[in-house]
Image: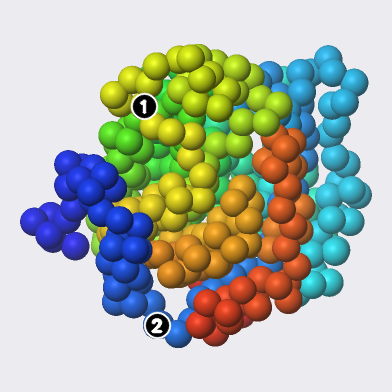
Amino acid sequence: MPASSRITPQQALDLYRCSSLPELADRAQQNVEQRHHPKIRTYVIERNINYTNICQCRCRFCAFSVSPRDQKGYVLTCEQIAEKIESLLSLGGAQILLQGGLHPHLSLDWYERMLRDIRRRFPSLHIHAFSPPEIHFFAQHFDLPVSRIIRCFRDAGLNSIPGGGAEILVNRVRRLVSPAKCTADQWLEVMRQAHRLGLCTTATMMFGHVETLAERIEHLDRLRTLQDDSLRRRQTDPRSGYFTAFTCWPFQPGHTRLSRLDRYDPLRNPNRPRRDDELLPAGAFDQLKMTALARLYLDNVDNIQASWVTQGPDIAQLSLLAGANDAGSLMMEENVVAAAGTSYQIQLDELRRLIRAAGFQPVQRDYYYQRV
């Protein structure tokens, strides 16, 4: 899109603050219809597999991870992972999302063997694995360049990299919510290297904690800038990767240390005054508005994915009328958000029904948004 016709950060701020939800959703929906078939909304059958919950990072928003010494810690065996994949295949799925904590005692060879074992058993499976904080941690822990880690995993069977661990790509925010995790620049560098090495990736945002609205838009702007670079590279090297999709969701405070930080929340801290730049805790309204704004701002990312994990299937359905062209993943298993006290489940028939009830034809797709 020509730079002159792009939404600027200031315009995005004004749109979010001054537009009603119906106005913003309608504008986003017009954008969707220019990009995608007006009567089709896609979905993917995927399984989320957390290969370990042991993490030395212990982010303040996470209620899932445990310390290396915790008796509740686990590391899945290859057999356990294979059993989970078999149940995915029985539903017609062909993709896994494989992520874990920053485990201080697993070797690089362990990760490569895990990937090779999956690829040997399931040669056609799409392996979407290892978020940028994991990749960055491996590079530091094994004293290797990020590009070397990505090459090792790609050669062992990795197909693409998920956008987890982005939270808000502003270091002020990251120092508060995940001080031991990679910086915003380091997160983006992992994705830049992945794209250069021919791997596509996704992008995410977890909002509604300590960030300002301007910082949410800065997050979107940094993604858009990196996507510009990656798409320019594809003009000379079509094998280069890029962001295939974006999705966002509100922070869930249950059982997290972040919920105990001094953040504005009229229910939890009724006597604390609200600063001018602070936002109310985010819910379904914000989810829909951010989805619509992301559709308009990320003009170089084709696919905006709805998220039912934190706000439920009905809000995901409404997202299909507010800028999302994809209903997201069946997932089959979700542990991280559930550990914070929010647990929604959805069956394949229900996912298809939600799409139809919103007025669209449900179509199963693969990671690259090709129809299955």
- Residue lying at 63% horizontally and 56% vertically, measured from the top left: 312
Q: Measured from the top left, where is residue 60 in percent x and y? A: 60, 21
In the rendered structure, find residue 291 and report the number of the disc placed on it.
none
Q: Looking at the picture, which amino acid does disc 1 mark?
A: Glu
- Residue lying at 84% horizontally and 56% vertically, measured from the top left: 84
Residue 29's place in the image compared with 340, above or below, is below
- Residue 281 visible in the shown view: yes
Mark 1 or 2, nearer chain start? 2
Which is more toward the observer, 65 or 96? Answer: 65
Q: Which residue is mark 1?
A: 278
Q: Quadrant of residue 211?
A: top left
**Marks 1/2: CA distance?**
37 Å
Q: Measured from the top left, where is residue 58 in percent x and y? A: 65, 21
Question: What is the quadrant of the N terminus in the image?
Answer: bottom left
Q: Measured from the top left, where is residue 144 in percent x and y? A: 54, 26
Q: Circle 2 — which element?
A: loop
- Residue lying at 60% horizontally and 36% vertically, measured from the top left: 252
Q: Which residue is mark 2?
A: 38
- Label 1 Cα neighbours within 10 Å, binned few <14 / some 14-19 / many ≥20: some
Which is more toward the observer, 8 or 197? Answer: 8
- Residue lying at 28% horizontally and 48% vertically, measured from the top left: 16
**Comparing labels 1 and 2, the label whose residue is closer to the camera:** 1
- Residue 194 visible in the shown view: no
- Label 2 Cα neighbours within 10 Å, binned few <14 / some 14-19 / many ≥20: some
Question: What is the quadrant of the C terminus in the image?
Answer: bottom right
Residue 240's place in the image compared with 34, above or below, is above
